[in-house]
Image (cartoon, rainbow, N blue to C red):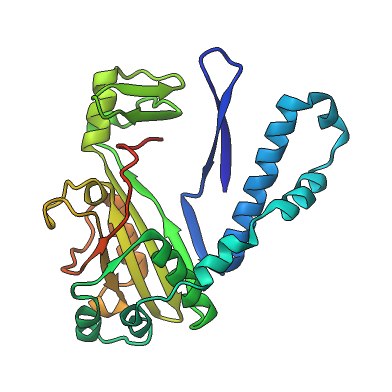
Amino acid sequence: METHKIYDKKGKGFTRIFTTDEVVNVNPIEFYKNFFLIQKAIMLKDLLSVEKPDLIPHLSDSFYIEEAKKNVDLDFFKQFEDIEVNPNFIELLKTTKKNDQKKLLKGQSLNPDELMAMIFKSYSEFGYLYSRYRFEILPPNFEGKKLPKMFNLNADGSIEKTGETDLTDGELKSLITQRKVIVPHFFEKNNVWHCFFATYNGLYGKENWKDGQAHYHYISSSFGISKDDFIESMRTGNYKSTPIHIDLLEYRNQGDANN
């Protein structure tokens, strides 16, 4: 996990950004528990630095961790343990036959909570390790340019940005609309792997699927490609196509996204 402070134009207030572009072969339950624990500890330190700055030199890192443990909402994880995962997705984790996988996923859907529950159950019940990546492929004419620390395309077409850049607002808008972003979730055990992946275009209704329905794509080790080769193909943006789509329900479009 990486974290950054992005200060406002006056240099007084700031936004705390947490990123995890690459998570490889982890126990997802422990990973997310640690992620939220560290996140809570850092946010507690940020809060105290504003409200009681005189205390900061006298407090150790272990203090924030211990305080965060008291405040981490354990029910957050329990709610995912209690979610009933669609039996088709459970059966999916049991088969290595491509035709069976296609039949099991035909017409299926997920919401974000169900995906998280599946991530947890894939490990606790089947021993699958979890990996997640984020691949961003910029148009060739933007390579080497200085990007803002954070930028967003608003609904009215305006650009909101923080940090120095050598790009105009028009160029940033073109970058957001032209770039490719792919976010895959891998479940892996021995030589068997399953991958649910989304593209920003697919999430924002810019792919040709059910009149703009947000969705995941699915591929696995049964499709005749190794995990390493598939990862490399996503890194370049020329990944192997797959006919399997899973509707992503209850997805809230947060705007055309950001760095």
Q: Can residue 253 be seen in this view?
A: yes
Which of 179/210 is in front?
Answer: 210
In the picture provided, is 114 more to the left or to the right than 69?
left
Which of 113/160 is in front?
Answer: 113
Which of 22/116 is in front?
Answer: 116
Q: Residue at x 12, y 57 (%)?
A: 210
Q: In which quarter of the image is the C terminus?
A: top left
Q: Which residue is drawn at 36% across and 18% down?
A: 166
Q: Which residue is drawn at 29% across and 19% down?
A: 169
Q: In which quarter of the image is residue 28?
A: bottom right
Which of 240/44 is in front?
Answer: 44
Residue lying furthest top? 10
**x and y percent of residue 148 in the render?**
42, 25
Q: Can residue 26 be seen in this view?
A: no
Image vertical order of residue 225 relative to residue 165, above or below: below
Image vertical order of residue 36 relative to residue 54, above or below: below
**x and y percent of residue 244 in the render?**
19, 69
**x and y percent of residue 8 in the render?**
52, 19
Q: In which quarter of the image is residue 197?
A: bottom left
In the picture provided, is 243 more to the left or to the right than 131?
left
**x and y percent of residue 226 in the render?**
32, 72
Q: Which residue is drawn at 29% across and 59% down?
A: 249
